[in-house]
Amino acid sequence: MSEKFTGSFTQQEPIPEDAIEAALAVLRHGRLHRYNVAEGEAGETALLEQEFAAQTGAKYCLAVASGGYALATSLRAVGVKPGDKVLTNAFTLAPVPGSIASVGAEPVFVEVTESLTIDLDDLAAKADMAKVLMLSHMRGHLCDMDRLMEICDAAGITVIEDCAHTMGAAWNGVLSGRHGAVGCYSCQTYKHVNSGEGGLLVTDDEEIAARAIMMSGSYMLYGRHLAAPGPEVFERVKYETPNISGRMDNLRAAILRPQLRDLGTQAERWNGRYRAVEEGLRGTPGLTVVERPAQEVYVGSSIQFLLLDWSEEAVQEVVRRCGARGVELKWFGTPEPVAFTSRYDSWRYAETPRLPQSDRILAGIIDMRVPLTFSLEDCAQIARIIRAEVSAVYQSA
Ligand SMILES: Cc1ncc(COP(=O)(O)O)c(C=O)c1O
């Protein structure tokens, strides 16, 4: 009898007890709205922003309703207008080009490499096509950020980092989200901290911060923020910045503050699991492990491997056989968007020429969640199952 995995790929850990206590305190006093505070009280949202700014070394921070809201707000705050073009990754997920489309702008997709990062040569070639790059650190893979910033600085491109999968990661000693003008994070259940929905935005630029705060619905109460620029900066932007409410509420902020304190420990636990799967897959004929560069500190909350240049049928057979043994794999080659997985040609609001290099790589990307509810033994078992099924299909091809 072949072994079968019985765990759930969508089951995250429970919310920690101290976060539950903090949430109950907010529920008991009832002041959930972001500006609803008692005399002398800062409020959970303002405190979360202050703490996340300190944690990332950013001057300013805004907590918002979702990662997608953080992305769209950043685009508006850096001055993207309807009709503008915005560079972004061909390998990413729907909220990223979606945020560009939501401000009336047009995504221009940049090819992906076999390292699953943005192709810097293609970026350099397209650098004159837009003034903003929405860089998605998709599935936690960081490109050579030093070279990327050189290309963008030389071309006068403003970089917004989508750190939905890289909260806690770093390149060459600099935290993800701190290379570009703005860093955007998601606190949605499948990310590195869990408030159901939620997002964070950090920047060192006072006008970007002031505009983002005004947009998030500050109702001229920006003086209550603890990670915001001074009133003179708001004076410059407050009459011309529209209100598009979306700041985080005190309940979700209360749940997040204790989790952010544990981020480092959680990242180590994720990486232990990631390495257990990776070790088990290494050396499987036909399967390419995505090697992580020495300059990269990553958080292995998911893992990807490549079945490069396999036929569609063979890849689908691997996904099917692993699924039958309880191992849920996602494939980026599927022509139709499936659940969270979609590809650049699924987003038909954008007119996109074919990207042959990305087509080849996307057709080989297999993606798997690694929730912390899995033990190291679970991860080893999952790798054994994948290895066996990949080998079986590869040998029969
Ligand atoms: C790569 C990427 N960027 C941005 C987001 C947006 O995050 P949220 O779901 O918090 O809007 C997601 C969410 O899945 C994502 O996967």
Image: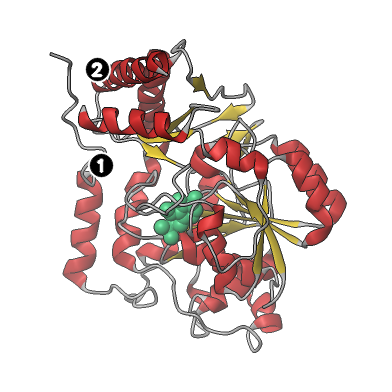
| Residue sitting at the far bottom | 239
The residue sitting at 60% across, 49% down in the picture is 90
Question: In the visual, does 333 lie left or right of 143?
Answer: left
The residue sitting at 25% across, 29% down in the picture is 374
x%, y% of residue 112?
63, 40
Instruction: Count neighbours of disc 1 (C-alpha within 10 A) and say few if under 14, some if 14 to 19, many if 20 or more.
Output: some
Q: Residue 385, located in which quarter of the rendered image?
A: top left
Q: CA distance from mark 1 to mark 2?
A: 17 Å
x%, y% of residue 392?
34, 16
Question: In the visual, does 69 lie left or right of 78?
Answer: left
The residue sitting at 65% across, 51% down in the picture is 354
Badge 1 amino acid: Gln
In this view, 248 is above or below 338: below
Badge 2 amino acid: Glu
Q: Which residue is mark 1?
A: 12
Mark with earlier residue (1, 2)? 1
Q: Which residue is mark 2?
A: 377
In this view, 14 is above or below 104: above
The residue sitting at 39% across, 60% down in the picture is 198
Q: In the rendered view of the protein, which quadrant contains the N terminus?
A: top left
| Along the line of sight, the residue nearer the viewer: 376 or 49 | 376
Residue 12 in view (yes/no): yes
| Residue sitting at the far left | 1
Which colour scheme appears in the figure? secondary structure
